[in-house]
Image (cartoon, rainbow, N blue to C red):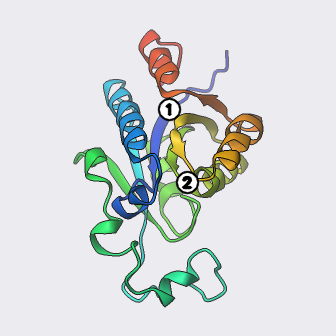
Amino acid sequence: MSDIHVHSALLVMDMQEGIVARLAQQGDALTSVRTAIDAARGASIPIIYVAVTFRPGYPEVSPGNKSFSALKAQPSSSLTGKAMEIASALAPQPTDIVVTKRRVSAFSGSDLAVVLRSQGISHLVLCGIATSGVVLSTLREAADLDYQLTVLADCCFDNDEEVQHVLLTKIFPRQAEVLQVETWKMKLLSGELQK
């Protein structure tokens, strides 16, 4: 066993009203992520919510950014106002941390790295929407930053089932432990995982 003491945090990413509303399996998403949040709270693991948000008029979005430039052309986009709030069924508690990002990865355009460093976090447990977006981008960047990683497979969602399957079974296991939320919860309760 390594001498490095591992401190974990659960990252709940892009679980915002407008994003959840576009997801085919909304109920499943909220139920499984709620289980992960409750397990983290029970184990005194910090919960960090990551939300993509923009100022009115989207001044952070370059016309060259294919992912976000369509927002400027659609002022009534579902990524404004209440739609940008964390899903009410998963609402943060006052002791939770909320990080705002401006790009796909949780690290891009945010102070997540500063928060993690300040809290002594070395192990990230990832969940969010979409698996092919924020989860993939964050996992890749976190791996390059030498974080230990766990992905909660049934707490990651994508409307493309084939992409979801390939990422969770072939790509993510190269850089992270991929677990079901109940398995992760049982490992926490048994003390098998360090907090």
Label 1 environment density (alpha carbons within 10 Å; few <14, some 14–19, many ≥20): some
- Residue designated by label 1: 7
Q: Which residue is drawn at 40% across and 47% down?
A: 26
Q: Where is residue 91 in the image (x, y as percent from the top left)?
A: 27, 49
Task: Say whether residue 154 is left or right of residue 43.
Answer: right
Task: Work out how far the residue at label 1 is from the one at label 2, CA to CA, in angstroms.
Answer: 25 Å
Label 2 environment density (alpha carbons within 10 Å; few <14, some 14–19, many ≥20): many
| Residue 145 shows in this picture | no
| Residue 168 shows in this picture | yes
Q: Where is residue 117 in the image (x, y as percent from the top left)?
A: 51, 48
Q: Which of marks 1 and 2 is nearer the N terminus?
A: 1
Task: Say whether residue 60 is left or right of residue 45.
Answer: right
Q: Where is residue 2 in the image (x, y as percent from the top left)?
A: 67, 20
- Residue designated by label 2: 130
Above/below status of 144 relative to 3: below
Disc 2 element: loop
Disc 1 element: loop
Quarter of the figure with residue 57: bottom left
Q: Which amino acid does label 1 sit on?
A: His
Q: Which residue is drawn at 41% across and 34% down?
A: 32
